[in-house]
Amino acid sequence: MVCPCAAPARPQRGRAPFFFPVYLCPEIQPESCFQLRQAHKNDFDVGGFAKCYEMTDLTTNKVYAAKIIPHSRVAKPHQREKIDKEIELHRMLNHRHVVQFYHYFEDRENIYILLDPVCECSSMAHILKARKVLTEPEVRYYLRQIVSGLKYLHEQEILHRDLKLGNFFINENMELKLGDFGLAARLEPLEHRRRTICGTPNYLSPEVLNKQGHSCESDIWALGCVMYTMLLGRPPFETTNLKETYRCIREARYSLPSSLLAPAKHLIASMLSKNPEDRPSLDEIIRHEFFLQGFTPDRLSASCCHTVPDFHLSSPAKNFFKKAAAALFGGKKDKARYFDTQNRVAKEDEEIYKLRHDLKKTSITQQPHKHRTDEESQPLITTVAKPEALPETKQIGDSIRMIVRGTLGSCSSSSECLEDSTMGSVADTVARVLRGCLENMPEADSIPKEQLTASFQWVTKWVDYSNKYGFGYQLSDHTVGVLFNNGAHMSLLPDKKTVHYYAELGQCSVFSATEAPEQFISQVTVLKYFSHYMEENLMDGGDLPSLMDIRRPRLYLLQWLKSDKALMMLFNDGTFQVNFYHDHTKVIICNQSEEYLLTYINEERISTTFRLTTLLVSGCSLELKHRMEYALNMLLQRCN
């Protein structure tokens, strides 16, 4: 419906790009002027009703994807009803992996829907057309995002009903977003479901073809078809005859080539189960061994739109390892050893990226390194005691403070005690604090409402190359650190000029990165390459602001530990961080002003910070509690 106070102008005919003013309701956006350009190779797959343009608001320079639908194409009531329903459903959605709906308006000729812009790749259909097939790591990368967006839709009781490659759009950061809600519908009870056969033929489920109606399980079936298509380059039920395609779908008859690995085959087969009740839920899909046992990149380069990525040894990584090996083993003077190193790197490269199942650990220490025992290598087992009944709030008082401060004895403050302590006592203190919280907090259904703004450092990026040099990480203030295999630690400060070197706990040497002492030159070179690699190839792991308290001591890594589920890092000031692989959630514990704070970064990289004293009073969700329990057991494993 046209706003009564709008004064629409007729678009000027001419060669693209062309310009025309669109006058909207003054209460919404007074006299906004848009520059409109026909989208060519980054065209949306918007179906028969609409064309997509790139539209720029000249008052803000904000770029939109404009879906423009001529009134002549929706002249019939049922056609207009379809557009109105799409707008109604889409405008209420707000999720990282769903195309954002910004605004819609209309003039006498067209309906305009303003959406997220897309990059040159446009959609997964464009990528697959150029690439033919995708690698398993890429499929995991994209499927995680599809599942995240689809789970959000289902939680809103919305069925997409047309999941296919052409409806997965890619932005400039190579993030996937679900789009085109032209066939989307509300989830209805079984007896009220529409029996309409709609969607893309190759992705229809047996129950939809049999006119039993769409359900969440129908979207899961389509997701199975999408995964199959990504890996093999064609839909599972594609034939030269539509009637035969439908027969294959009804019988769930398709082939799984031997080229697919077993986890991929199993996941596809489960999603393409003929009986909807046998299909996995979205949560079960993400927990499947296809995701848990395989490498998933944190981000992809835009070059993946048209070329196969080299996860074994990407170009930046290859340069990194070549230069690092040259720095450590010499250049022309020792060519034989250099090339031998490169041959070994080619065999070891997967260890850089894959989340290994065996536990790996290293530390800064004042004692010789201990050999790892069989007992230390055993899988972690969560055995945290169940909490006692919560005492009355007025009885907690100082006991809460005592628990979360870790009973630090005669120290005047916890931070002072940690600074002067040994590595073992740092770990023991954090473990005691975390255990005290878990054993005393009540059960609850949600995370506390408290939201604090705190200035602490945390790890935003990391690289494990301990089979060669050590473990590298980047802090939120852009300090880069490497804990070398010999137990020494080196940090490159945010100015990229100053280096801190810790041979032992608490003993720091400071020098210029460009004038390093001779004995440190090779390690500084490796440190710089770690810094360059993480800056160019890894993305940040959350939305926490980068705040720095200059009064606090510089952070450097004391210990780290990898299990098959998570990475643990413990720092000199007691900051303790655990990153969980399968959903990219993070738990961070730090000490500030004699208060322990816990920060939780969820699957959407959104952070929440609160005091541990708040947890002791209010409790937290099982989702967070289970992660805290696992983090404690990792720390106890490392302490032992």
Image: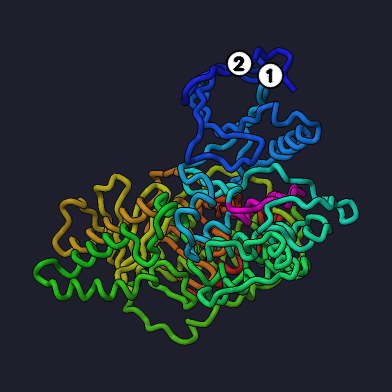
Q: Residue 603: where, in percent of width, then height? A: 59, 55
Q: Nearer the viewer, residue 188 or 166?
A: 166
Residue at the spot 13% in from the left edge and 71% down from the top edge = 335
Residue that sits furthest to the bottom in the current view: 374
Query: Which quarter of the picture shows residue 442?
Result: bottom right
Instruction: Please name the residue that numbered disc 1 is placed on.
Output: 108
Cα–Cα span, label 2 and label 1 = 8 Å
Residue at the spot 43% in from the left edge and 58% down from the top edge = 573
- The colour scheme is rainbow
Image side of residue 40 versus residue 350, left or right: right
Q: Which residues are magenta?
A: 146-165
Residue at the spot 26% in from the left edge and 60% down from the top edge = 319
Query: Which quarter of the picture shows residue 3?
Result: top right
Q: Is residue 113 magenta?
A: no
Q: Relative to 436, say whether 22 is above or below.
A: above
Residue that sits furthest to the left in the current view: 333
Image side of residue 391 versus residue 419, left or right: right
Q: Relative to 107, say whether 554 is above or below.
A: below
Q: Amino acid at mark 2?
A: Arg
Neighbourhood count class around disc 2 (C-alpha, 10 Å): few under 14, some 14–19, many 20 upward: few
Q: Residue 248: where, in percent of width, then height? A: 70, 68
Q: Earlier in the sequence, mark 2 or mark 1?
A: 2
Q: Is residue 407 visible?
A: no
Q: Residue 102: where, in percent of width, then height? A: 62, 32
Q: Nearer the viewer, residue 409 or 268?
A: 268
Q: Are marks 2 and 1 in contact (CB under 8 Å)?
A: yes
Q: Relative to 317, say whether 52 is above or below.
A: above
Instruction: Please name the residue that numbered disc 2 is placed on.
Output: 10
Query: Which quarter of the picture shows residue 423?
Result: bottom left
Q: Secondary structure at mark 1?
A: loop
